[in-house]
Amino acid sequence: MAWLGLVPSEHSSGNTTRRERLTKTGNALARTMLVEASWSYRHPPKEGHPILERSAHLPQEIRDVGWKARTRLCKRFRHLSQTGKPQPRVLAAVARELAGFIWDIARKTPMPA
């Protein structure tokens, strides 16, 4: 998440901790794609026929992480939107969590021989 620039910058001294805007370091294209992908979590998660066909060859463990990501990120998007957070902040928060789920799936995916 830090590599993508999806974490807040921080200035700390003693007992004082100040968090500011996102750092925006790292790969701007990857960060942009994650923010654009986070728009899709405003809709409720469904497992339609196209998604089932695409994921049929994947291990069950990875499919479970994908479903968990869809339900959690949709819930997070709706909760943050309903509490009155600005839309760019909601999208950045969902993109940050999406990066975590992508990392988890990449960690569980076997390396090709």
Image (cartoon, rainbow, N blue to C red):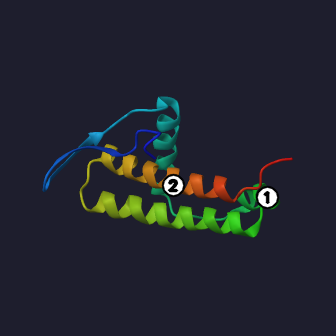
The Cα–Cα distance between marks 2 and 1, rounded to whole angstroms, is 24 Å
Query: Whole-percent x and y of residue 64?
Result: 65, 69
Residue 54 image-quadrant placement: bottom right
**Mark 2 or 1, nearer chain start:** 1
Whether residue 4 is situated above or below residue 55 in the rendered picture: above
Mark toward the viewer: 2 or 1: 2
| Secondary element at tag 1 | helix
Report the side of 6 relative to 59 (left or right): left
Question: Who's the residue at 40% across and 58% down the image?
Answer: 77
* Outermost right residue: 113
| Secondary element at tag 2 | helix
Q: Residues within 10 Å of mark 2 (few under 14, many from 20)?
A: some
Nearest the camera: 90 or 109?
Answer: 109
Q: Residues within 10 Å of mark 1 (few under 14, many from 20)?
A: few
- Report the amino acid beneath label 1: Glu
Residue 26: assigned label: none
Query: Whole-percent x and y of residue 19?
Result: 22, 47
Nearest the camera: 81 or 28?
Answer: 28
Whether residue 72 is situated above or below residue 12 in the rendered picture: below
- Report the amino acid beneath label 2: Gly
Query: Whole-percent x and y of residue 31?
Result: 47, 37
Q: Which residue corresponds to mark 1?
A: 53
Question: Who's the residue at 49% across and 58% down the image?
Answer: 43
* Outermost front residue: 14
Report the side of 113 relative to 75 (left or right): right
Question: Who's the residue at 38% across and 62% down the image?
Answer: 78
Report the side of 55 relative to 70 (left or right): right
Residue 100: assigned label: 2
